[in-house]
Amino acid sequence: MKFRFLLVWLVIFILMSVLTGGQALASGQNEDLKKLEIPKEPGWNHPSYRGWESLSITGLIATYYDLDLDRELDYMVIRKVIRKASAEETTIEKAIEIAKFDNLSVFFSHPVVYFTNGNPLFYCKGVDHRGNCRGDMWVDIAEDGLNGNEELNSLSAPSLRVR
């Protein structure tokens, strides 16, 4: 009788350990997934917006954000330049009209107006003081917005075929 009682308690203990351990594991995985989520770009009129720059790699423009508003950059998106126009020949209103019609983003800088793809090519979570990506970086080859087809890429473990 004592053996049967001990066996029942042992089975209950093992089942409870397995069930609660699985829940802890699942919640740990959810936390890891939350860390890897790509934040939605807030936009230029959001308080976290910190500016943009034309990168030294020709044809790319980076937009910077401070998502947690701690006065340090922590998020960056990079877009490809589709075309340029002269700021002297193109008014701001005309550039915005063109961008809306072609579903592009527009960046003004005298003497050049940059038109970029409406959606980023790269998303970077973790930016150093020089504006370089030091955290997780995703590439969206299709440049079709955040829809799940973005691939996490890092220098330590690139997902794309790099030679």
Image: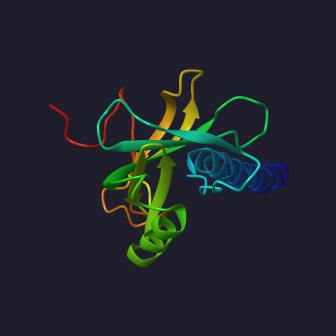
Residue located farthest toward the left when viewing the structure as drawn:
163
Residue at the far front in the pictured view: 88
Q: Is residue 46 visible?
A: yes
Query: Can residue 150 be seen from the camera position used here?
Result: no
Say which residue appears at 63% left-offset and 56% top-offset. 43
Q: Is residue 87 above or below residue 55?
A: below
- The residue lying toward the viewer, choosing from 17 and 137, is 137
Residue 14 left/right relative to 116:
right
Q: Tell me what residue is drawn at x 61 percent, y 48 percent.
A: 29
Colouring chosen for the image of the structure: rainbow
Q: Residue at x 46, y 65 (%)?
A: 95
Locate the N terminus and report the quarter of the image it occupies.
bottom right
Query: Observer-nearest residue: 128 or 2?
Result: 128
Instruction: Write the residue at 31% across / 63% down.
Output: 142
Residue 163, position as x, y percentages in the image: 14, 31
Left or right of residue 159, residue 14 in this image? right
How far from the left and from the top, in percent, is residue 64? Answer: 58, 40
> Residue lying furthest bottom in this view?
101
Comparing 77 with 86, the one in front is 86
